[in-house]
Amino acid sequence: MEQMRPGEHLTNRSVIGLALIAGSAPAFALLAPQSPPAVVLAIGICLAVSVMPILGAWAGVLLLPILGLIPGADWVGVGLGSVSAMALLLWRSRPIVKIDPEEVRSLRAELRDAEHERTLLHRHIQRYPALMEACLELSGTRELDQFAKVLCERTRELLPGITHVRVYLGTQLKQLCYASADVNGEPCPVDAGADQYYVATEARQLLRRNGRAVRLLTPLRGDRRQQDGGEAQRGVLDVSLESEDVGDRLALELLNALGRLGGLGLGAVDLVSQARSLALHDDLTGLFGQHEFLRRLDEQAAACRRVHQELGLIMCDMDHLKRFNDKHGHLAGDAALRLVATILQRVLPTDAIICRYGGEEFAAIIIGRDRERLELIGNAIRSAIADQPIPVGDKVLHVTASMGITIWHEDELPRTALIRADGACYAAKAAGRNRVMVVA
């Protein structure tokens, strides 16, 4: 019988060989008619077994009862022979398997890898509720500082083994590190480099590997926004971690999801900032509106009261702007308003707070200047407005303005001082316009 490979049944060649050997037994019985019946019966059973591979197992079994017709054979012998034949058939049909030690070692290695991956999957699945909490917390942020801090903390909670995490926010031209943490939770800020600006500008992920160290830079906004002039808020989530085989891949997928959630949160902060800017600033001049100016006036007065610092107020009202509009048109009037706003921003100190208080009125807060200095500033503004030409079509026009100045007293409400400055401005108009009036 030829040698069989592990797990393989008897080959057809082996079966045919056995059949020929067993089939020769009846021929021997015919040549020896004086043989005992038991010998003839045994030879017949061999014949039945030998034809099983050819005619089928059940065909061979059905031939066994015929052996009972042999002279001298009894049915008990036929029965025992039939049972023996069935047992031989079953024994022959069992597979012969040889255990390969190398294959066993390979299967054990595959089992260990599968168990390792299952453990990592279970660990990461447990982190997805934390990812949902991060989404809810990021969606509730309204300031960039708060957003960066939440994103940094949540990243460390989701992946405790990271080497560092940094959150960069800003515009296309300027990215700042708003929040950072190393493996011990200590701040580790680093100035933005070429990688951060590339990811923020192109909105593309950047992956760098150095041995087991993996660094992933994920954009926090998914669109490029080429039409925004580079002013829309962009951001980068910069994370470094140690590679863990399949765990590395799962960690990167988790960071991708966190980056997309962070992008949504940053977009919400950006929209809030834009809406707040529209509410705080005047569309025509870009200066603060009245509501924001009054809020800042209260804040500045409280700060000056604590340190006993002087706070000056200037009210500026353009002269005869309605008449100017009626004569030259509203486009010319808008140009005149923008001119006054520009001069106020140029002449006033850089720390001054300026607003468009009303239709043709402007107001300013100046910290730390005495009365004489405020009067000099007011006259410089007045003369600059009167001297600056306004080109409208083929015409060159001029406007003037009147101003009232006062200094806030610590024992009064800030808006009381503002009313006093407004009264001084009307007094300047009553005195002939294009002049500055200072009141105590």
Image (tube, rainbow, N blue to C red):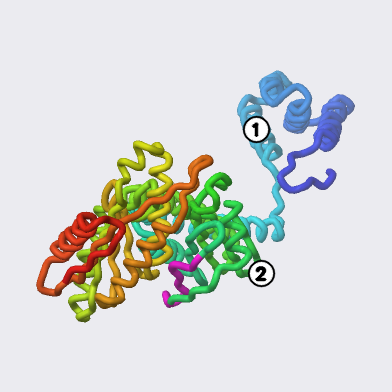
Callout 2 secondary element: strand
Instruction: Say which residue appears at 78% left-offset and 47% top-offset.
Output: 5
Callout 1 secondary element: helix
Q: Quadrant of residue 186?
A: bottom left
Q: Residue 200: x and y, percent?
A: 56, 56
Asked if one can make out residue 157 in the rendered structure from this viewpoint, the answer is no
Image check: 42 left or right of 338?
right
Residues marked 1 and 2 touching at CB (< 8 Å): no
Q: Quadrant of residue 379?
A: bottom left
Towards the viewer: 290 or 124: 290
* Label 1, residues with CA under 10 Å away: few <14, some 14-19, many ≥20: some
Specify the farthest residue to the left: 411
Amino acid type of the residue tagged 2 in the rendering: Asn
Instruction: Say which residue appears at 35% left-offset and 62% top-offset.
Output: 382
Q: Residue 119: x and y, percent?
A: 48, 58
Disc marking residue 210: 2
Instruction: Say which residue appears at 52% left-offset and 63% top-offset.
Output: 175
Magenta stretch, overall SS: strand
Q: Quadrant of the N terminus?
A: top right
Q: Which residues are magenta?
A: 176-186
Tell me the distance, in whole angstroms, between the alpha carbons under discs 1 and 2: 68 Å
Towards the viewer: 181 or 342: 342
Amino acid type of the residue tagged 1 in the rendering: Met
Residue 198 to residue 440: above or below: above
Specify the farthest residue to the front: 432
Q: Residue 106: x and y, percent?
A: 67, 58
The residue identified by callout 1 is: 86
Q: Residue 273: x and y, percent?
A: 37, 52
Instruction: Say which residue appears at 27% left-offset and 60% top-offset.
Output: 403
Q: Quadrant of the C terminus?
A: bottom left
Residue 179 to residue 18: above or below: below
Magenta span includes 182 = yes
